[in-house]
Image (spheres, rainbow, N blue to C red):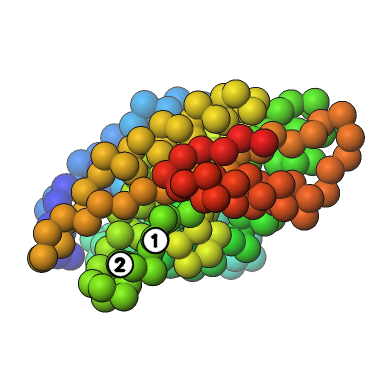
């Protein structure tokens, strides 16, 4: 086995004689560090304090069995490769254990250097592939909800979130503010400097909005140069203060460009939802867009609250 780093293995083994055999076999393989728990309780307590790379699990323990261990580990959201060892071979039990989450199954009578090395290698490879699959799924999920250029949520996700947050606001009688943000004279940047510069500006605005928003806020790219943000449990006054802070952050920012830094400003419209009367999402968006239009008509680079 080609081990590039030390593997920490936890042996959950009730028999002292069997553990001595396991230890002697693993000692012949370079790069192994072995710990032991004598029962299910001790193993779970060990996992609270440490994260071994692999668990060698005796199927029958003084206070439970392999199924009990695997289910307990799953409940704790631990992701640790495991190989179950048993005194007697049983293909039906092996199949059920693997369905429950074990990576491999080996009888103690066949526990030798070659077989356990193969089991460890296979278990680690399975877990590596599983983690790569999980990363790929997270990436696909993120791509379906995020705008690639700005890193903000996309409009589809935003609309779903707005319905959810509006319903929660009405249910609990909590205020919610909605902000609509538009870059001033953005077309001039594209026309005079090109779309590469325009994309650079949009990406930088996305960064500023991400830094500005709270963890509970939901900012999105609403259109080409238009953004929106849901501010849960935020009154009109609070929303206006937050939007003014965003306006100032954008105004002070300079986007580096080969012909010189690019300065941009934003116009922002902010409204608070009406919790005493049931207000449709369409109506709430219309009022926010009207507030944004008011900010532009009043001279741009300002916040209009309505």
Q: In which quarter of the image is the C terminus?
A: top right
Check disc 1: other Cα within 10 Å, few if <14, some if 14-19, many if 20+.
few
**Quarter holding the N terminus?**
bottom left
Residue 155 showing in the rendered view: yes
The residue located at (38%, 63%) in the rendering is 186
Q: Which quadrant holds residue 204?
A: bottom left
Residue 180 visible to the viewer = no
Whether residue 18 sits left or right of residue 58 in the image: it is left
The answer to whether 17 appears left or right of 24 in the picture is right
Q: Is mark 2 in CB contact (under 8 Å) with mark 1?
A: yes
Q: Is residue 296 left or right of residue 258?
A: right
Q: Which residue lies furthest to the right in this view?
A: 277
State the residue position of label 2: 189
Which element carries disc 1, helix, strand or loop?
Answer: loop
**Furthest-front residue in view?**
298
Q: Where is residue 281 in the image (x, y as percent from the top left)?
A: 77, 51
User: Exactly how many numbered labels are in the figure?
Assistant: 2
As drawn, the label of residue 185 is: 1
Establish if 8 lies above or below 239: below
């Amino acid at each position: 086995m080609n081990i590039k780093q030390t593997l920490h293995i936890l042996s959950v083994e009730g028999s002292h004689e069997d553990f001595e055999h396991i230890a002697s076999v693993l000692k012949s393989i370079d790069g192994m560090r072995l710990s032991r728990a004598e029962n299910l309780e001790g193993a779970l307590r060990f996992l609270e304090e440490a994260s071994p790379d692999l668990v060698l699990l005796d199927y029958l323990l003084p206070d439970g069995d392999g199924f009990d261990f695997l289910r307990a580990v799953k409940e704790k959201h631990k992701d640790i490769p495991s190989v179950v060892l048993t005194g007697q071979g049983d293909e039906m039990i092996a199949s059920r254990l693997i369905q429950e989450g074990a990576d491999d199954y080996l009888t103690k009578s066949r526990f030798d250097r070659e077989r356990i090395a193969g089991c460890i290698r296979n278990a680690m490879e399975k877990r590596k592939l599983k983690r790569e699959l999980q990363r790929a799924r997270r990436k696909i999920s993120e791509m379906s909800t995020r705008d690639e250029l700005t890193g903000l949520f996309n409009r589809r996700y935003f609309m779903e979130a707005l319905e959810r947050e509006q319903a929660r606001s009405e249910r609990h009688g909590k205020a919610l503010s909605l902000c609509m943000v538009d870059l001033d004279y953005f077309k001039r940047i594209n026309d005079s400097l090109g779309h590469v510069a325009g994309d650079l500006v949009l990406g930088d605005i996305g960064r500023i909005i991400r830094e500005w928003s709270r963890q509970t806020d939901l900012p999105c790219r609403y259109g080409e140069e238009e953004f929106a943000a849901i501010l849960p449990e935020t009154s009109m006054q609070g929303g206006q203060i937050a939007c003014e802070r965003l306006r100032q952050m954008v105004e002070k920012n300079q986007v580096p460009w080969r012909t010189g830094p690019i300065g941009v400003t934003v116009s922002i419209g902010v409204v608070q939802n009406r919790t005493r009367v049931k207000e449709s999402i369409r109506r709430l968006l219309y009022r926010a867009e009207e507030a944004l239009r008011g900010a532009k008509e009043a001279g741009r680079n300002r916040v209009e609250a309505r």
